[in-house]
Amino acid sequence: MISFIAQRIAKAIIVLLALVVMNFFLIRMAPGDPAVVMAGEAGAGDQLFIAQLREKFGLNQPLPVQLFLYVKGIVSLDLGFSFRQQMPVAKLILDRLPATLLLTGTAFAISLAFGILFGALAARFAGTWADTAITVAALIFYATPLFWVALMAILLFSVTMDWLPSFGYETVGAGYTGLAHVLDVAAHLILPATTIGLFFMATYARMTRASMLEVNRLDFVKTARAKGLSDAVIQRRHVLRNALLPVVTLAGLQAGTLVGGAVLTETVFAWPGIGRLMYEALLQRDYNLLLGVFVVCSAMVLAFNLITDLVYRSVDPRIEFAS
Amino acid sequence: MSKRKILISLATTFLLSTAAVAEGPKAGGVVNAVIQPEPPSLMMGLVQNGPTQMVAGNIYEGLLRYSPKLDPLPGLAESWSVSEDGKVYTFKLVKGVTWHDGKPFTSADVLFSIEFLKQTHARARGNLAQLDKVEAPDESTVVFTLKQPFGPFIGIFEVGSLPMIPKHIYEGTDFKTNPANNTPIGTGPFMFREWQKGSFIRLVKNPSYHVKGKPNIDDIYWHVIPDAAARSVAYETGKVDVLPGGSVENFDVPRLSKLKNTCVTGAGWEFFSPHSWLWLNNRSGPTANKKFRQALMFAIDRNMAKDVVWNGLGKVATGPSGSAIKYYTSAVPKYDYDPAKAKALLKEAGYAGEKVRMLPLPYGETWQRWAEMVRQNLQDVGINVEMIATDVPGWNQKVSEWDYDIAFTYLYQYGDPALGVGRNYVSTQIAKGSPFNNVEGYSNPEIDKLFADGAVAFPDSAREEIYAKAQKILVEDVPVAWMLELQFPTITRCSVKNLITTGIGVNDGFRDAWIEK
């Protein structure tokens, strides 16, 4: 198993470097550059000012030189300096990462737990009104755009009912500490986490239902019934466990993308996370920051893929690690 | 409501407001305001974008402030005088001013700031082009000597144009990497306290501020909320008290302005005078033809755009200068909405339906709607318009590389035609790579001479005559299609008093503001 993990990590590093090079050129293919954007924001842009900015950012150097310097930095774990934020990229990302992990982690946990639960219930009661209700609800949440759900949630729970805060990570200036602070952050977390969670929950519910219905038809389930096991035990121990493999695959893929995938929700709810950082960096052509976020997101996807492979093994012991 | 009730209500309002005035400013309280986008830095000497100025205008100060009529007011200078030949400006500084770290502010700081800003501040560099020397005969006197009279000189000292930088912190250091950039030190009414990137910036009252009794407010929180709809909701749910101009989409303004305890004002933009127009590429294509450009002016219903897209705010622009700018004249050729005249001019121009590429300004829904409206106007008179979608960097690149036919824009005018108008029309400002100079490629030696003469003419009456002539020529030639003098309404709780007191508005800081309890 250790050699399996070592091999996967080595492959991941190669993939990561390839992604860095590809993203480097991809970003620079987009029109505009950070010097002109910043000159525009300053409301003044004489040639000298723009040339000074380009020199300061190293954009006056040939592209291969820029790439070499960037990759050299990455190899020594230096993600560079943000043009616009005037701070090291690593610090900016590390400052924002906890908020994103809290948001997406919560959303992921909610969606996985409730998605599997509702999917299993729908499969167990297939063809009944409960199944129809869960399936229709899942379809609605799956098909509705996230930003619309977010805005409607704000309208209902913040504006009309005044139950939950509409933006931010905490109540600014309140000075809460200890449990009060935890509860305050939790209150701010509910709307954005639920908004993201609903979409993924719908996906997991539909997949769990379909997978369980398929497994239910297999011979070993008939054998289990013939052995006289109770239906609850069959569903929980045999059907659900076997039906979870595709859900684990999907969850593994989505867990990686969740780090950078909360752009819309973080923007609408003013959540100070990495998705918003990436979006703003894109609009400002803040090359180093954007590449830095890409590197972190790519690393996360690769890491979660590895974790998924390991989880496979515990869900289904028949799977072996190929070295 | 009956007439009697209205009268009682009006009388009550009058009595309450009289009582409030009689009570005078109250000390204390917290103001929650919105800032968008998040500023990259608060060090005003290094970064001059709008959000930086809005927040850091509370931390830093300039030598002067300006009234809504753009007359100079005391700032860090308590008085000033100009020599008879218009070449020597002498400023007497307020005595006893200290930086936020307790060190005294003196004339040496002014001299240092001038040298600092010449290196880092593009607009200041242009504004100081006529400066021959600056001297400090004593700790509280600064003398600027110009190479030749420069009419707009007295207008370049507001905090955003020429902020004072602490010499004791920056002298002998690499300005760009000085650690103090993250904890800015100024002389202003508020001091920097905390910045949680992506969330908020907190400023606190400067207890040693040099104006006695000010500021009144204890704390200001600037909340970073990236989505326009979410900013509206933040105000609606009472989480923020101030939405500076441009914070919300225009179509939200009427709804928000009807909320309880809400006041809306268009004041505070006089110095900037945001002026909108369509860049018209004078080099090639149909827009190179003067008659085609004139046809555009007649084809576009600017009054309707003002009333529908901008909710009645602002004014229809009559030419290159905004009406708040010095030497503005309305005695120029008029271009009222007249599609028939536009069609006739298009025929005279020999326009045969060639495709015209139009770039909307990618600044949100209001601008997108405006572009749709203009496209419809142009299609109505037979112009074949193709809309090109871009984001901000893409727009910047296309415009600065002259890769467009028509492009929406708006720019600040900074109070004087020599500072914020001429740059868009003189041929010395035709240079690829910048979206803020003479992007349209208009070249007219007469206009070049008029703007060159106008900047240095003395006295003011001579400048007035020159700029009147320049405006007439430009409006006749239509190098660009002027649209509206924009007004970005500031929305506040009515209980936040005295927020906007100068022509620089919210960017001039909250030093005079107070909260009615």
Image: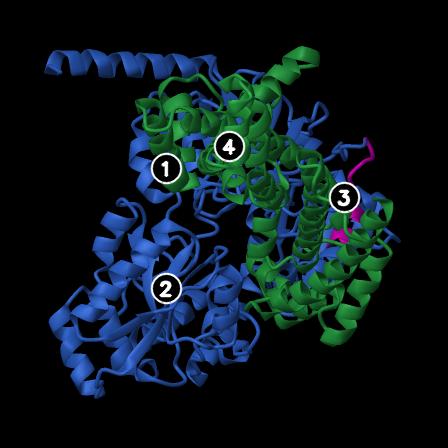
Callouts 2 and 1 on one subunit: no
The label nearer to you, 4 versus 3, is 4
> Marks 3 and 4: in contact by CB < 8 Å?
no
Residue B397, how many percent across, how many down? 53, 70
Q: Is the residue marked by circle 4 packed among few (<14), some (14-19), or many (20+) residues within 10 Å? A: many
The residue drawn where x is 31% and y is 72% is B386
Give the amino acid at mark 4: Gly
Residue B370, how many percent across, how many down? 30, 56
The residue sitting at the bottom extreme is B350
Q: What is the distance, in whole Å, between disc 4 and disc 3 at their CAs?
A: 28 Å
- Looking at the rendering, the stretch of residues picked out in magenta corresponds to B102-113
Residue bearing mark 2? B277
Foreground: A185 or B136?
Answer: A185
> Left of B252 or right of it: where is B195?
right
Residue bearing mark 1? A139
Residue B428, how many percent across, how many down? 54, 79
- Classify mark 4: helix, strand or loop: helix
Q: Is the residue marked by circle 1 packed among few (<14), some (14-19), or many (20+) residues within 10 Å? A: some
Residue bearing mark 4? A197
Foreground: B74 or B434?
Answer: B434
The label nearer to you, 2 versus 3, is 3
Residue bearing mark 3? A91
